[in-house]
Image (spheres, rainbow, N blue to C red):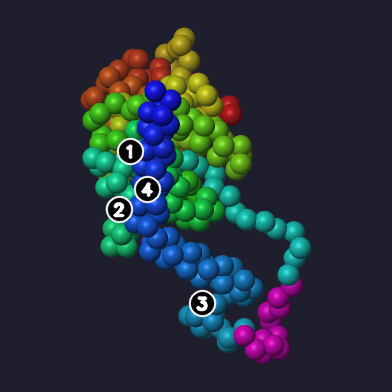
Amino acid sequence: MLKHICSYGYMVLMLFFLSACASKKKFAETNKIYEKQVEQLAEVIKQPLPTPQHMASAGLPSPGVEGQRKDFEWVGTVNFNMRKPNFVILHHTAQDSIQQTLRTFTLERTQVSAHYIIDKEGKVYQLLNDYLRAWHAGNGRWGSVTDMNSASIGVEMDNNGVEPYTEPQINNLLVLLDTLKANYKIPSENFIGHGDIAPGRKVDPGINFPWKRLAEKGFGLWYDDVLQAPPTTFNPLDGLRILGYDTRNASAAILAFKRHFIPEETTEEWTPFALSVLYNLYIKKTTL
Ligand SMILES: [Zn+2]
């Protein structure tokens, strides 16, 4: 019996190593490209001065030669560190498997990536350093931030867009978000969805995403149990804009708001309940 258990354990261990090796080998080439690109970016950071191309396009002489310019001098400060991400954008992959998404994010022609993907078993894949800019947000804005990729970390959930999220997946998402929030001091209200920043264009992470559960753990805003009707002077579009929504397309903004907070409402008409929810969140946001 013991012998059987041992050989079974050995087999499981071997399979684990084999699959780990296969995965390492599979992405060995793109891992190498990643490292090379990071080295190139490090070289850019090491450059103290604007690159000659930038200077030239601005009609300025090259700063490369010492003493060439009297109106420009480099004085290195000693007080600085890295810029930090200040938002987390949540997505669903809208793909059928984690392997498909790993492939999508490691093919140059797709031009898309994210910092993390969490598969249905809860395994977290990291694809680039948090300080680097992933290409997950695309065209989108939140409040006055128009370059969401520069300001955020992208987290993709392995989910095809219609299936429910799994428990291990949400549990490990909460652990990851906790780490990111602590590491970069990201405000609670800055945990938002791709559909929030790109209304009319994106819907992820979709109506199955447990936003309320996240908010209870400190990731994202949620409304109170007891609500009050807003005053008649309250303009709902102003409310949406204060929350962060891009209201240039009003119906898209309303639908994005409802998908996040009131998924059971699927029309763009304002119901008394939707108005009370919005007013409650608007008060929270303006008194943060
Ligand atoms: Zn997305």
Q: Amino acid at mark 3?
A: His
Left or right of 208 in this view: 86: right
Q: Which residue is mark 2?
A: 103
Q: Which residue is mark 1?
A: 158
Q: Quadrant of residue 61?
A: bottom right
The span from disc 1 to disc 2 (Cα, nearest Å) is 13 Å
Instruction: Indicate which label's residue lies in the foreground, 3 or 2.
Output: 2
Q: Mark 1, residues whose alpha carbon is within 10 Å: few (<14), some, or many (≥20)?
A: many
Asked if the residue under mark 2 is in contact with the one under mark 1, i.e. CB atoms within 8 Å, the reply is: no
Farthest residue, direction right: 78
Q: Is mark 2 within 8 Å of ligand 1?
A: no
User: Which span of residues is magenta-colored?
Assistant: 64-75
Return the x and y of residue 22 as percentages of the image width and height. Answer: 35, 52
The span from disc 1 to disc 4 (Cα, nearest Å) is 23 Å
The span from disc 4 to disc 3 (Cα, nearest Å) is 49 Å
The span from disc 1 to disc 3 (Cα, nearest Å) is 40 Å
- The disc, 4 or 2, on the residue closer to the chain's N-terminal end is 4
Q: Which residue is mark 4?
A: 18
- The disc, 4 or 3, on the residue closer to the chain's N-terminal end is 4
Who is closer to the viewer here, 127 or 253? Answer: 127
The span from disc 4 to disc 2 (Cα, nearest Å) is 19 Å
Say which residue appears at 52% left-offset and 32% top-offset. Answer: 175
- The disc, 3 or 2, on the residue closer to the chain's N-terminal end is 3
Return the x and y of residue 50 as percentages of the image width and height. Answer: 58, 75
Left or right of 107 in this view: 90: right
Decide: is 231 above or below 137.
above
Say which residue appears at 33% left-offset and 21% top-offset. Answer: 262
Instruction: Indicate which label's residue lies in the foreground, 4 or 2.
Output: 4
Marker disc for residue 54: 3
Left or right of 73 in this view: 264: left
